Image (cartoon, grey):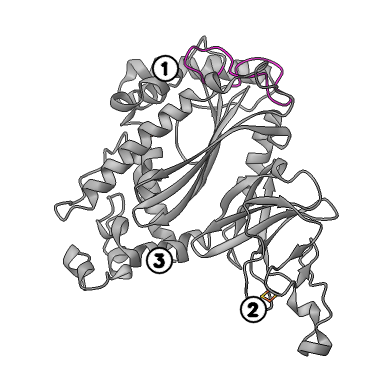
Amino acid sequence: MDGTPLAASRGGVDVNGLIGRHRPGGPLERPFYVSPEMFAADLARIHYRQWLFVGYAFMVPKTGDFFTYQVGTASVIVVRGTNGDIRAFHNVCRHRGSRICSTESGHAPRLTCPYHSWTYDLDGALLLDTMREFGVERATLGLKPVKLIDAGGLLFLSLADDPPDFSEAAATISRKMRPHRIDKAKIAHQVDYVVKANWKIVFENNRECYHCVPNHREYNIAAYDVQRDQALTDPVMKAKMDGIVERANARFRALGLDEGDAMSTMTGAFWRCHRTPVVEGFVTQSMDGKPLSRLMGDIGEWDSGTLRTTIFPNFWQHTNCDYAAAARLTPIAPDETHVRAWWLVDEKAVEGKDYTIERLLPIWDITNRQDWAICDAQQAGVSSPAYVPGPYSTVRERNVAQFVDWYLGEMRS
Ligand code: FES
Ligand SMILES: [Fe+2]
């Protein structure tokens, strides 16, 4: 079989064949974005194995607080245990497999299955004596644990028994995010978007700003992404950007923050966390350069730049001195992705006094909606039998090629 639309209509594509014939640095063929078989392979080889961002530690402040996250057919409970640690368990009863928690979040002193009321403590241990009636030790019937890492208040989990090494990413995120105290933030606003595009189309869009001039008038006001790309080929712009980064770094050093650069390059194969300047004269990423909320955490002065955090395959966050804007991607279907966006502010920030949703939201909500419209249109075109992949810019789309190469490497392993 091959990867043509006809092959798909005959009932399947050759997933490994398509992966095997891809040329490094080049774009993906059509079935990667439309085929149900490829979507199933993405879930099995990417989302069920990699580190996924699920939420924030402050979402479960007290023992017994929990939230759930579903990806593919897997559902996970993230819960604050009796000793204060946050743990994650598969949301699957060890009796006959019922879903235990059906709500997105809640509070419970114990986790009770709705079917026959098997009850588990917050550490996942089954509280029922199963020996007499079921002939099985209850110690073998605890909830199945899921690996979870708290990186400075950001919670990542992996469904794999042997997930990729996340230690360097977690340490870097914890260290660089610390002054912003994401562990002491709160959600000012949340928006759920449904993008009619494959999750890779959504992430590829995030990895370039070639589209920013024609599409992101508002975002461009506060960011140097377009100039940064221009500096890769224009020596005059490079000298200008070098000066901007130097002045920004002097400010960051004075604030006790890590230094940054203007680039969008990944730090590791699947992650980055680095600070970039906002436009000179702006104190944060806003459309008028003015604050959108009170300073976050331990940040003592205005303008910390933007700490850009990106984790393949499902998360990015721009963390400013007064707010953070985040996006969590969840694949729903070959041509559908759920994006939950959060706007975080300091836990002490008061709506109406320190911030208003009317001012906080637009720069990222407008940018998000512009991006989803682009992604919807790309998915529609890619789905056509006429689609053949075109070339990537070796300058402005180099990070898209890096994402695709990472993806294929994981699909092969
Ligand atoms: S399936 Fe959960 S108690 Fe029976
Ligand atoms: Fe965009």
The answer for how far apart the CA atoms under marks 3 and 1 are is 40 Å
Identified at 22% across, 65% down, the residue is 3
**Dot placed on the residue nearer the N-terminal end, 3 or 1:** 3
Q: Position of residue 64 (x, y in %)?
A: 79, 53
Q: Is residue 332 magenta?
A: no
Q: Amino acid at mark 3?
A: Ala
Please tell me in which quadrant of the rendered image residue 320 appears: top right
Does 273 sit above or below residue 336?
above
* Towards the viewer: 106 or 144: 106
Mark 1, Cα crowd under 10 Å, few <14 / some 14-19 / many 20+, is: some
Ligand 1 closer than 8 Å to the CB at disc 2?
yes
Give me the disc on residue 67: none
Mark 2, Cα crowd under 10 Å, few <14 / some 14-19 / many 20+, is: few
- Boundaries of the magenta span: 284-304
Give me the disc on residue 41: 3
Q: Amino acid at mark 2?
A: Arg
Which residue is farthest top?
281
Q: Would residue 190 appear left or right of 132 to someone viewing this image? A: left
The quadrant of the picture occupied by the C terminus is: bottom left
Q: Is residue 303 magenta?
A: yes
Marks 3, 2: nearer the viewer: 2
The quadrant of the picture occupied by the N terminus is: bottom left
Q: Would residue 209 appear left or right of 108 to someone viewing this image? A: left
Ligand 2 closer than 8 Å to the CB at disc 3?
no
Q: Would residue 252 appear left or right of 141 to someone viewing this image? A: left
Give the residue pinned by disc 1: 221
Q: Dot 1 lies on which element?
A: helix
Quadrant of the displayed image that contains ligand 1: bottom right
